[in-house]
Amino acid sequence: MWQPALILRARPWYIPSWVSVMLGFKIWKVTGHSMAPKIPENSYILANRWLRHLPVKKGQMLVMEHKVYGLIVKTVAIVDRNGFIWSKGENTDSISVEQLGPSSKEQVLGRVIGIFKPN
Amino acid sequence: MLLYEIIERLDSNLHFERVSAHCDIPCKIYDPISAQLAVLTMIRMVELLEDLEQKAPLSLSQQAQFQRLVAEKESHGKKVKEEIRVIWGDYFKSPQIEAYPEIHELTHSIMLATSFAKQHIDMDASMDLLAKVNRFAEIFWQSKGVETHVATCPYPPSKALVYPKLG
């Protein structure tokens, strides 16, 4: 039988994690270095999913579900007149804006609000 | 830094989801050897197909082998195109293109030669493709300041390949 009290006693960090999930916060680990130097590889980022409902603006860093590349973190390059988000990396090694193509707002999983770098 | 260590420790328990800061050039690793090996595979498939031709009419298992050989030739042809396109598109930038202006035409000719080698069971066509891919490899290594030499690959189909002189 499922006993939440027992689980919480064994793994107390579940409580803050559940609360943070409810508030829309989520921590992600970053692989790849296309967002360096702002987000070096192996950094942790704190993103909030509720903020995705606010207007998306150039320069914001977003976690997105890309149709080809999967879960990615990128910087907003421009939001076009149809509301599509064109994103980019932070250095020349990133795939280009054109290769990434436009993303809809529905593909945004959260806006980055905190970066925790390895060094 | 301290915060990072705390999160890292949490990560070992909670296993945070990974998000990719995706790059096309994560480590700048390019090597035409993959394309060269794919061409060698195509050549080997042609050899084996020619062997099979001598055995006609084919038994059921030989027909199955025929299918596999053709499929492998096809898939390695696609690999040649993919590998060459990536090096041409991602590695070659203005300085290399200025130094080796033939690279565009060569790349395009590799695309056409690969299609032709895929469409036919033709040793001459496959060898023509190998010559082009070898030239591509030669240019690639020269552009990196690495000397090359030609040696026969020590396995079937034992054809001449351009190798970098390393170390």
Image (cartoon, rainbow, N blue to C red):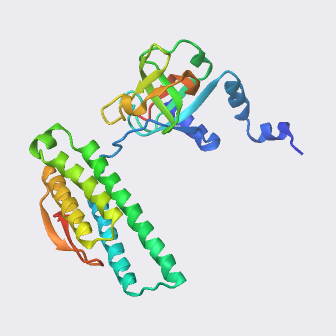
Q: Give the total number of marks visible in the rendering.
A: 0
Q: Residue at x 46, y 26 (%)?
A: A102
> Going 49% across and 78% down the picture, which residue do you hit?
B63
Q: Is residue A84 left or right of residue B107?
A: right
The one nearer the camera, A62 or A18, is: A62
Q: Is residue A55 visible?
A: yes
Of A63 and B89, the residue lying toward us: B89
- Position in image of residue A94 (x %, y %): 36, 35
Q: Quadrant of residue A20?
A: top right
Q: Quadrant of residue B149?
A: bottom left
Rendered image quadrant of residue A89: top left
Counting from the top left corner in percent of width and height, residue A107 is at 56, 27
Q: Say which quadrant the C terminus of chain B sits in.
A: bottom left
Q: Nearer the viewer, residue B14 or A32?
A: A32
- x and y, in percent, of residue B48 in the image: 36, 79
Q: Is residue B57 left or right of residue B120?
A: right
Residue appearing at x 38%, y 39% in the figure: B23
Placement of A5 over or under B55, stated as above or below: above
- Please provide percent x and percent y for residue A3: 86, 40
Q: Residue at x 16, y 50 (%)?
A: B144
- Near-viewer residue (B130 or B66): B66
